[in-house]
């Protein structure tokens, strides 16, 4: 995937942006939104911009006219400490036929994943450029939106699932290419409904599993009396049970890692058997059950970099 933003302060080298997928200029202060009353033709626009000066941080210019037509151009400016400088080169990134203007005040223009989500929501294709008037009345673009589809497999309850929420938080600030999340839930209540035991033993009370189709006990509370229960839990829960009671009860597997089959889709899930490490198996990323934001960011960076080099 060719979607890395340029480094702050660097001069944009034009010439290949038109062919790039997922291009998002960052920081978005380098994007200028300007009125234009000329012909929306590539050669005309190029000549127009070559005869203008631009602010010393401007890289992308969005031209708009009273007919609500838009064009996007990248400009390469001279290296200069003056406030304004001449344009040296121009690349026409998109003309009106390929531009889609979107007003979405909930979209953060600094968040590539949010821009991609808005573009997909409004039907922008991978051949088009989305111009998004977003949060704070600021504007940015995503050119040829083609976000990575990332499946997040998580158990519920509780809902919304924690891993999905953490990934959304990370995508709001981390320097990552656009990612489109797809939540796949494993409902523990449905798993419990596949058996009819005298009672259940579940990992903890915080899971929201107080009411099932049989009495419920909580492993983290270490019930004093060993009941004739079925364990709704993973391998780690089974290890706890062996330690507490010296035996293995009937068990319904709940581990996302065990219940998810690889099918060529980039996937992230969590596993209790991991405590500090992140494991990568092809397009499958496994993080510890107690992963924090820093660990999630590391996992996403590792996953996206791996895909970029495939």
Image: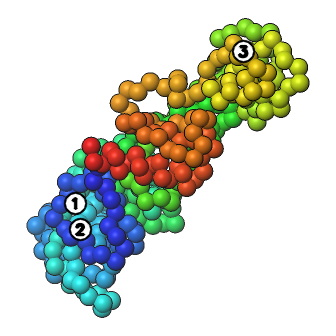
Q: Which residue is mark 3?
A: 249
The mark that comes first in sequence, 2 or 1, is 1
Whether tag 2 and tag 1 are in contact, CB under 8 A, the answer is yes
Q: Is residue 253 visible?
A: yes
Residue drawn at x 24%, y 47% as measured from the top left: 127
> SS class of the residue under badge 2?
strand
> SS class of the residue under badge 3?
loop
Residue 241: x %, y % from top left: 74, 24
Residue drawn at x 65%, y 30% as measured from the top left: 236
The mark that comes first in sequence, 3 or 1, is 1
Closer to us: 106 or 148: 148
* Badge number at residue 17: 1
Residue furthest to the right: 224
Q: Residues within 10 Å of mark 1 (few under 14, many from 20)?
A: some
Residue 238: x %, y % from top left: 68, 24
Q: Which residue is mark 2?
A: 74
Q: Residues within 10 Å of mark 2 (few under 14, many from 20)?
A: many
Residue 196: x %, y % from top left: 73, 8
Q: Is residue 142 above or below residue 88?
A: above
> SS class of the residue under badge 1?
helix
Closer to us: 56 or 256: 256
Q: Is residue 48 visible?
A: no
How many callouts does the rendering have?
Answer: 3
* Quadrant holding the C terminus: top left
Residue furthest to the left: 43
Visual colour scheme: rainbow
Q: Is residue 144 above or below residue 231?
A: below
Residue drawn at x 47%, y 40% as measured from the top left: 279
Q: CA distance from mark 2 to mark 1?
A: 8 Å
Residue 212: x %, y % from top left: 76, 18
């Amino acid at each position: 995937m060719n979607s890395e933003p340029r480094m702050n302060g660097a001069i944009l080298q034009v010439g290949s942006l038109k062919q790039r997928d997922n291009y998002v200029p960052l920081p978005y202060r380098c994007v200028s939104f300007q009125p234009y009353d000329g012909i929306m033709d590539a050669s005309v626009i190029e000549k127009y911009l070559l005869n203008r000066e631009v602010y010393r941080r401007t890289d992308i210019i969005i031209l708009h006219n009273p007919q609500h037509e838009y064009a996007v151009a990248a400009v390469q400016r001279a290296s200069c400490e003056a406030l304004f400088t001449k344009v040296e080169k121009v690349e026409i990134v998109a003309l009106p036929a390929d531009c889609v203007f979107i007003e979405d005040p909930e979209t953060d223009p600094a968040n590539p994943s949010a821009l991609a989500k808005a573009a997909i929501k409004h039907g922008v294709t991978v051949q088009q450029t989305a111009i998004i008037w977003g949060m704070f009345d600021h504007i940015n673009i995503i050119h040829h939106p083609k976000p990575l589809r990332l499946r997040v497999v998580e158990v519920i309850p509780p809902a919304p699932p924690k891993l999905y929420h953490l990934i959304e938080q990370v995508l709001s600030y981390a320097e990552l290419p656009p990612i489109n999340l797809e939540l796949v839930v494993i409902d523990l209540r449905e798993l419990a409904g596949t058996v009819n035991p005298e009672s259940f033993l579940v990992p903890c009370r915080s899971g929201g599993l107080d009411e099932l189709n049989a009495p419920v006990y909580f492993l983290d509370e270490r019930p004093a009396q060993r009941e004739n229960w079925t364990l709704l839990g993973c391998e780690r829960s089974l290890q706890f049970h062996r330690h507490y009671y010296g035996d293995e009860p009937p068990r319904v597997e709940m581990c996302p890692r065990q219940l998810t089959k690889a099918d060529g889709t980039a996937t992230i899930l969590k596993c209790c058997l991991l405590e500090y490490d992140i494991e990568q198996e092809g397009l499958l990323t496994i993080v510890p059950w107690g992963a924090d934001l820093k660990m999630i960011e590391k996992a996403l960076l590792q996953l996206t970099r791996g895909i970029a080099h495939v």
